[in-house]
Image (cartoon, rainbow, N blue to C red):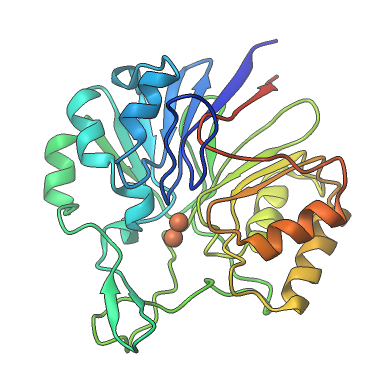
Amino acid sequence: MPDIRITLLTENTAKGRGILGEHGLAYWIETPDGPVLFDTGQGQTLFANAERCGLDLSRTTAVVLSHGHYDHVGGLEALLKVAPAARVHLHPDALRPKYSGTANGRTQPVNLPYLTEGQLQREAAGCVYNRAPSRVNATLHLTGEVPRTHAYEDTGGAFYLDPEGRKPDPIYDDQSLYFQTPQGPVLILGCAHAGVVNTMRHVAKLCGTNHLHAVIGGMHLLHAADFRLEKTYEVFREMGVQLIAPCHCTGLRAVAGFWSAFPGHCVEVHAGKTFTFMVP
Ligand SMILES: [Fe+2]
Ligand SMILES: [Fe+2]
């Protein structure tokens, strides 16, 4: 049986000689159809960590963007320069201007100014835009827009489409990757701005099951109320998730809650960490 090997190339924390941490996420996913990069971090650690891990980014067949925030797309420009065969999968809203609220009541841009549609079209081997669920290759699937079905979930912060902070950003571009294993689907999140429970339910439905084997990634529960956290843990329990790997923007309080609610099922995540799963 072939397998999928995932290496965290960018994560807020790091472990291992020479491995660097950076606020962001990037996963190197080796599939039977070649390596896929899911997000690129801010771009300051991607290349250094790939080199430390002995991974050749020029072999990238596809780059998938979880959404348009700088800590996920920052390394894209540099990546495309070294990976001429890489096509880019993204939701069209990932290229929109994006802002977040600051502590002093202002806003700051959180997208990348250079990432215009024209530039991307010129630099990538191809652009594949999707709003609906789609495939990256024979093994990897992309959720498309995640239906917001649980009222207790939100995007996880003050996000806007305008610098004045008048138009909230629903972050419809937020999408996640998943693939099937003999133990059940494995879900890989960017920031889960659509809500981690919404995303889990959506993927389970797409897979025709009520169960997920593993959930890895950012869950954006930094500002979540206790009620939301409890509801979230309940869904992980109900869906029988065996491997829980919260990281990046999940928030320490939520991560601590996972570790105490699911002893033996939580995994530490850091740049340099690898996961291997069998695929049918
Ligand atoms: Fe984000
Ligand atoms: Fe993020």
User: Within the displayed image, which quadrant is ligand 2 positioned in?
Assistant: bottom left
Q: Residue at x 80, y 55 (%)?
A: 236
Depth check: 14 or 200 in front?
A: 14
Q: Position of residue 1 (x, y in %)?
A: 70, 10
**For residue 214, side relative to residue 176 (left or right):** right
Identify the image quadrant of residue 41.
top left
Count of numbered tags: 0
Identify the image quadrant of residue 125.
top left
Name the quadrant of the C terminus.
Answer: top right
Q: Is residue 116 above or below residue 231?
A: above
Q: Position of residue 82 (x, y in %)?
A: 21, 24
Q: Is residue 185 above or below residue 32?
A: below
Q: Is residue 233 visible?
A: yes
Q: Is residue 197 visible?
A: no
In the image, farthest residue toward the front:
17
Q: Is residue 106 above or below residue 15?
A: below
Q: Residue at x 66, y 71 (%)?
A: 149
Q: Residue at x 11, y 38 (%)?
A: 122
Q: Position of residue 249 (x, y in %)?
A: 54, 58
**For residue 51, side relative to residue 202 (left or right):** left
In the image, farthest residue toward the top:
1
**For residue 189, side relative to residue 114 (left or right):** right
Identify the image quadrant of residue 95.
bottom left
Q: Position of residue 36 (x, y in %)?
A: 43, 28
Q: Residue at x 57, y 75 (%)?
A: 154
